[in-house]
Image (cartoon, rainbow, N blue to C red):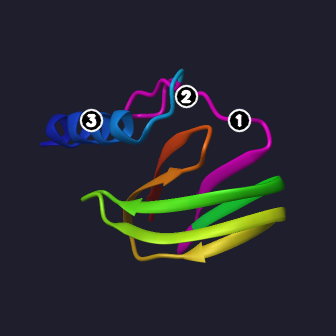
Amino acid sequence: MKRIIRISLLVLAAAFAAPGFSAIADDRIETVAAESRAQSVEGGISLSAAGRVNFEIYSITGQKVKSLAVEDSTVKVDLPKGCYIVRTAGWSKKVVVK
């Protein structure tokens, strides 16, 4: 079951990925732009940006959950437990909310 989930995450990450982006579902390899960051925090996802960055958050099924712009700050987005794909113009990343 875990293997099927990992393969699904890899396929979703590839679908949302920008050119030159590489990822493995368990986050062993990732390329992330230096000016923006997404990470799991208790009860949601923390989004940080230096400059203006547009973030899109998708559920694991591919539905857009949230879209927001962050400018020179850190914002916490409250979300239920689950797996999400966070996407910007330069990268995509899988984030697990526990």
Quadrant location, the C terminus: bottom left
Image quarter of residue 41: bottom right
Residue under numbered circle 3:
11
Residue under numbered circle 2:
30
> Which amino acid type is shown beneath numbered disc 3?
Val
- Give the alpha-carbon distance from disc 3 to disc 2, as whole Å: 15 Å
Nearest to N terminus: mark 1 or mark 3: 3
Left-right relation of 90 to 29? right
In the image, 40 versus 56, the foreground residue is: 56
Image quarter of residue 63: bottom left
Measured along the vertical axis of the image, is residue 25 above or below residue 68?
above
Circle 3 packing at 10 Å, graded few (<14), some (14-19), many (20+), is some
Please check the rendered image and state whether residue 25 is part of the magenta-colored stretch, yes or no: yes
Q: Which residues are magenta?
A: 21-44
In the image, 35 versus 9, the foreground residue is: 35
In the image, 98 versus 7, the foreground residue is: 7
> Which amino acid type is shown beneath numbered disc 2?
Glu
Percent x, y for residue 84? Answer: 41, 58
Percent x, y for residue 9? Answer: 30, 41
> Which amino acid type is shown beneath numbered disc 1?
Ala
Please, what secondary structure does the residue beneath circle 1 have?
loop
Nearest to N terminus: mark 3 or mark 2: 3
Image quarter of residue 34: top right
Circle 1 packing at 10 Å, graded few (<14), some (14-19), many (20+), is few
